[in-house]
Amino acid sequence: MLIKTKKYELTPKTYRRVGIRYILRKQWWLPVAIFVGVIVLNIIINALGYRNWWIYMLAPLGAWLWYLFWWIQYTGIPQLPQNQVMFEKYSYEISSQNILMKKTPQEAMMFKWDLIKEAYKSKDAITLVISKGQFLHFPFKIFNSENEIKFLETILMRKNLLSSTETESNEAGKEKEKTTTIQVSGNGVLQKSKKSK
């Protein structure tokens, strides 16, 4: 099966959001370590006799500076001329052998699956990670049917890029939204059914 998507243009705002989400998934522990490390270091310094309380303000500042660093990186990358190619409008042809990015029928770029480091699925898209600064972001709206999304998920699971638990948790969330609950009162009479969220 070959998946042919609609044309899609990755915007700098979406790129920044996807990038920040990715780096938080991979390095969530780093701002926490900075925060805790500064506090522990100050406790040790206070125990040695040098009393200072202003250093405690450096803990949230250090964690915030880590986030700011990555925000600046993901905001600046789209501004570089050599990266403009990532933000043009493409259609994609996805098969189990490769991914073809097509600007026009004559202009195309091919990605082999071994270039993809990992993949993750959010509630509205599938993102393929090439590096910390390069992503292939596929919103569900660019696919022509639900079967194409499932086929892409199957390819990603076969290539060990997407875990089946991630897919199942997203499916469970969708199923939970669709189910209705029926409550029975103490005397056995059915009450109104409500949509669970």
Image (cartoon, helix red, strand yellow):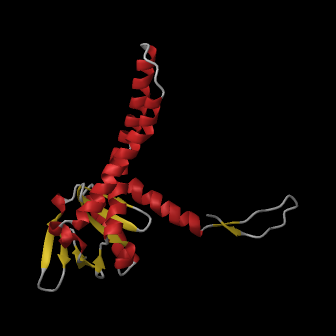
Q: Quick check: 190 left or right of 73?
A: right
Residue at image coords 18%, 79%: 102
- Quarter holding the N terminus is bottom left
Please say whether residue 123 is visible from this viewpoint: yes
Q: Nearer the viewer, residue 131 or 114?
A: 131
**Which residue is rendered at x = 88% and y = 61% of the image?**
187
Residue 109 image point, x, y percent: 13, 73
Q: Residue furthest bottom?
A: 105
Residue 124 figure quarter: bottom left
- Location of residue 146 with respect to 40 vertically, above or below: below
Q: Nearer the viewer, residue 154 or 196?
A: 196
Up-down relation of residue 187 to residue 149 (above or below): above
Please tell me which residue lies in front, 161 or 43: 43
What x and y, as percent, mark residue 170?
46, 61
Could you tell me residue 165's position as x and y percent?
Answer: 41, 54
Image check: 160 left or right of 59? left
Q: In which quarter of the image is the C terminus?
A: bottom right
Q: Position of residue 93 (x, y in %)?
A: 22, 77
Query: Going 38% across and 35% down the picture, which residue do you hit?
Result: 33
Residue appearing at x 51%, y 66% in the figure: 174
Is residue 97 among what the camera can see?
A: no
